[in-house]
Amino acid sequence: MRIAAFPKAFLHELIVDRSMTIFEWIELARTLGVDGLELHPGFFHEGGRAEIDAVGEALADAGFEMPMLCASPDFTHPDAAQRARERDHQADAIRLAAALGGDAPTCRVLSGQAHPQVAVEQGLDWATEAIEELLPLARELGVALCLENHYKASTWQYPEFAQRKPVFLELLSRIEDREWFGVQFDPSNALVAGEDSAAFLAEVVDRVFTMQASDRYLADGASLDALRLADGTIGYSPDLRHGVIGRGLNDYPRIFETLRGAGYDGWISIEDGVNGLGEMAESAAFLRAARDEWFGGSKDVDVAARRRATEEA
């Protein structure tokens, strides 16, 4: 297991008002004691090969890998032309992951937004079709597509179409490729969906390629049952707060036990730090200690070998 970090606290600065550059984030991340950085296509502003090469050099100089790229396609959009554009954007993200990701890069993929006018079966059909259309490119470039149990991208109007576990599991089951398509598991998003995150992980662990790590805390006087909406989800309630990994609602001992039992040897990326870089550093320290306790310390990750073994099984 190796540890990466994603700058959730600085997304507005990096993507929206562009007051922070990707190079400034790389320098800040040197203090975290992590092995790699998960990046986002929105961090790249110039869009040319020179910028990609410069970022690659900056990552290498800092001793980082780029194992995971965070893309947010909306494959369930009701407009066919927009769905086609979303596929094109995802293809660009796959190419970017291939350019920066080393031997076994991964690229996040989502189903899309829960557009009110799109029925579940229709959305499943569209998301399945889009992912299967992208898999040949992913295979060609050696990039694994990882479906995240997501909640809501910052630019989206609606939550994730496959937020609820039954929809997520159905979409996952429709795509049989286990070598280049798998899961990016986020335990906190499972909580937001109203699920027991460790139990959710146990249902998909055989297809997990990467994992996000964060934690959630209840505000004083709040309860999970009170936060659940009519559909069983919680959403991003102000009573569900961010904090240091390992001290909140996620049962990380159960999560690590499940990962170890499945022979997990992939990346875990810190996706938090909204309360400051100090909390992200504490989370990194927690994951380093967990790596020593549960996974026998740092080791080389051979994701490609794991994919082959899974395919043969």
Image (cartoon, rainbow, N blue to C red):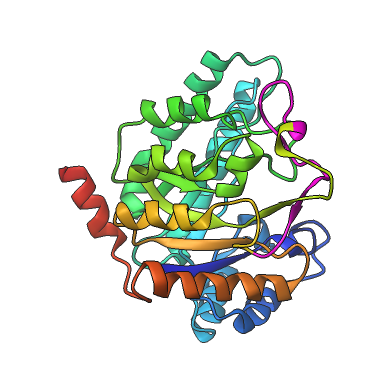
Name which quarter of the figure residue 72 lies in.
top right
Q: Position of residue 23 (x, y in %)?
A: 66, 76
Looking at the image, is 272 positioned above or below residue 128? below
Residue drawn where x is 44% and y is 62% of the image: 267
Mark count? 0
- In this picture, residue 140 sits left or right of residue 21: left
Please say whether residue 91 is one of the residues in the magenta stretch. no
Residue 182 can be seen in this image: yes
Q: Quadrant of the N terminus?
A: bottom left
Looking at the image, is 40 positioned above or below residue 229? below
Q: Nearer the viewer, residue 130 or 111?
A: 111
Residue 157 can be seen in this image: no
Q: Position of residue 312 (x, y in %)?
A: 15, 44
Looking at the image, is 141 positioned above or below residue 133? below
- In this picture, residue 255 sits left or right of residue 40: left
User: Magenta segment range?
Assistant: 226-244
Residue drawn where x is 27% and y is 58% of the image: 304
Residue drawn where x is 60% and y is 13% of the image: 119
Please say whether residue 236 is one of the residues in the magenta stretch. yes
- In this picture, residue 206 sits left or right of residue 210: left
Q: Nearer the viewer, residue 109 or 205?
A: 205
Residue farthest to the front, as pictured: 221
Name which quarter of the figure residue 86 lies in.
top right
Residue farthest to the left, as pictured: 312
Looking at the image, is 205 positioned above or below residue 298? above
Q: Position of residue 53 (x, y in %)?
A: 52, 73
